[in-house]
Amino acid sequence: MNICIYGSASDDIDTHYIEETEKLGKTLAKNGHSLVFGGGAQGLMGAAARGFYSENAHITGVVPKFFNVDGILFAHCDEMIRTDTMRTRKQKMDDLADAFITAPGGIGTFEEFFEIITLKQLGQSDKPLIIFNIDGYFDSLLNLLENCVAGKFMPHKTIELVHFSDTTEDIVEYLNAYKPEEFNILKYRNIKQ
C-alpha cells in the first residue's frame, strides 16, 4: 500500500513527535508499505521518510518546483515528482496514495487533512484516513469536529470517516482490517444532485 503521510516540516518541535513518526514510518515499511509524502527532509515529513528509508521501502516525494532550496528535500527518495503548484502537489499525492495518515503539524497539515476528509464526505474517496494523535495533539481537533456535530453543521458520520489513533500498532491493525464504506453526504442529506 502507498501510504501518504502529512505532517510538520519544523525541526523546532519536541523530539518525541519526531521519534514517534520515525517509528511509524519504520513499522509501516516493515509491513510492506511504501511512502508518498511532501518530500521534506525536516520535521515529521523527514522523520517518516527516515523510518521508511531505514527499511529500504520505496519513497516518493512530491514537491512544488519552487521548493528548490538546498537542504529542504529528503535526499533518499526513489522518485521525486515536481509539480507547478501546491494544489497540483496535493492532487498528485492523492492520486498516488492508497491511504492517508495525518501526523501533528501546522496549517499546511490541517489543510491537507481537511481536503481528504471533505473528499471522503462527498463520496469522492474511500481510502483510509488516520489521525496519528501523538500525546493528544489532535484532541482539540476532535473536539472541534464534535462541536460541528452538536451544532448540526455536519453529521456524526463525518467523524467516523477518520480513525484517531495514538499508537503505531493500532494504525497498522486498522490499515490491515480496513474495509471501504460508501458514504456521500449529499445522499445522506437527500440533496438533489
Image (spheres, rainbow, N blue to C red):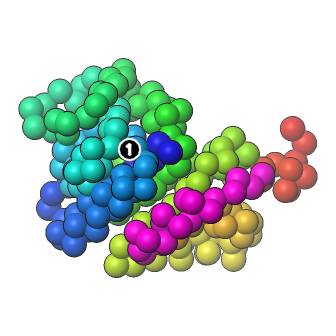
Residue placed most toward the observer, 123 or 80:
80
What quarter of the picture does the C terminus occupy?
top right
Q: Element under label 1? A: strand
The quadrant where residue 175 appears: bottom right
Q: What residue appears at the point 30 percent right and 57 percent down from the top-left corner? A: 26
Report whether residue 140 is seen.
no
Task: Give percent across and percent down for residue 52.
Answer: 29, 49
Q: What residue appears at the point 17 percent right and 69 percent down from the top-left corner? A: 15
Q: Which residues are magenta?
A: 166-182
Task: Give percent across and percent down for residue 180.
Answer: 70, 53
Q: Which residue is mark 1?
A: 35
Mark 1 residue crowding within 10 angstroms, few (<14) / some (14–19) / many (20+):
many
Residue 130 is left or right of residue 49, and the answer is: right
Residue placed most toward the observer, 148 or 38:
38
From what the image shows, is residue 106 above or below residue 83? Answer: below
The quadrant where residue 93 appears: top left
Residue 6 is left or right of residue 76, and the answer is: right
Q: What residue appears at the point 43 percent right and 49 percent down from the top-left corner? A: 32
Q: What residue appears at the point 32 percent right and 35 percent down from the top-left corner? A: 61
Please say whether residue 57 is one of the residues in the magenta stretch.
Answer: no
Please say whether residue 174 is one of the residues in the magenta stretch.
Answer: yes
Report whether residue 150 is seen.
yes
From what the image shows, is residue 81 above or below residue 9? Answer: above
Q: Amino acid under label 1?
A: Leu
Task: Give percent across and percent down for residue 106.
Answer: 33, 57
